[in-house]
Image (tube, rainbow, N blue to C red):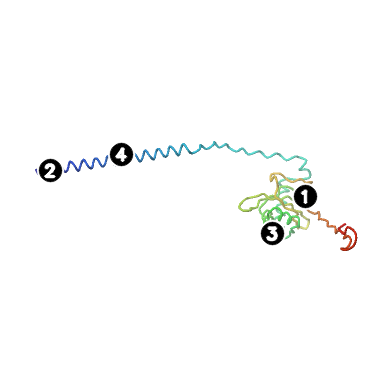
Amino acid sequence: MTTKSSNSARAQALERRTLSAEVRAGNDLLALRAQLHRAEKEARRAPTPAPSRPRTQQAVKPQRVQELAGIDTDEFLLSRALRQLREAVYDSRYHVCPHAIQHARAEGFMESDIMHVLLTGRVRAVYTEDRRWLVCGYFEAHGIRLPLHVAVQHYRDGHIDIVTAFVPKNPHHIISRARLAVLLRYDDEKVKAKEAVKGNKVGYKGKGGWK
């Protein structure tokens, strides 16, 4: 009797274990199905991203020949001008004109940015008749790299004047002689003030206003 009862107890325990394992497996299967169902619903709700189109960069238009009249871009002259420019800067034989300071304040760069361009940039054009060089380089503002062009007047004794500096609209083009002259002439203009003539005093007959 004892052996039969022990065998039946073992069989019942084994059945209970098997049943609990089946229930656990069924619960796991239901949980897995629920997860798959939720994932399918989220996938249906999410909008399909639009296909990205590759951006095509527009080619830079070639500069007109008329704009390069009187401008020399010979490599030998450019390298010699760059050497003379660096020597003048290293020897402190330079002067920053008010035009460059005004443009720096108006366009958001500093005098140190101008000097950085003179030391790291390159001479792209030589204005032979005007004895000027166009130095092109870059400066950083709030982590953004922007182009900066500097016009330099050079003299026979080795001194240079930093005539003006500006952020170009098209950094790949060389500013023409006429446009540079207009730019400098506009900077040289001064606002003319005219004092108004006072009219009749207060208490006297008349309009008593400003003429």
Disc 1 to disc 4, C-alpha distance? 84 Å
Callout 4–callout 3 Cβ contact below 8 Å: no
Task: Identify which residue, 118 or 189, lies in the foreground.
Answer: 189
Q: Is mark 3 on a helix, strand or loop?
A: helix
The picture places residue 161, in percent across and down from the top left corner, at 76, 56
The picture places residue 85, in percent across and down from the top left corner, at 71, 54
Task: Identify which residue, 23 or 208, lies in the foreground.
Answer: 208
- Numbered label attached to residue 183: 1
Disc 1 to disc 3, C-alpha distance? 28 Å
- Numbered label attached to residue 5: 2
Residue that badge 3 annotates? 90
Give the amino acid type for the residue marked by disc 1 in the picture: Leu
Give the amino acid type for the residue marked by disc 4 in the picture: Gly
Q: Is mark 4 on a helix, strand or loop?
A: helix
The single residue placed furthest to the right in the displayed view is 205
Residue that badge 4 annotates? 26
Quarter of the image for the N terminus: give it.
top left
Residue drawn at x 78%, y 58% is 157
Q: Depth-wise, is mark 1 or mark 3 nearer the camera?
A: 1
Residue drawn at x 73%, y 50% is 134
Q: Depth-wise, is mark 1 or mark 4 nearer the camera?
A: 4
The single residue placed furthest to the left in the displayed view is 1
Disc 1 to disc 2, C-alpha distance? 112 Å
Q: Quadrant of residue 153?
A: bottom right
Disc 4 to disc 3, C-alpha distance? 83 Å
**Mark 1 or mark 3, which has the lower sequence index?**
3
Q: Depth-wise, is mark 3 or mark 2 nearer the camera?
A: 2
Q: In this view, does 18 lie above or below 157?
A: above
Q: Is the residue marked by circle 1 packed among few (<14), some (14-19), or many (20+) residues within 10 Å?
A: some
Disc 3 to disc 2, C-alpha distance? 107 Å
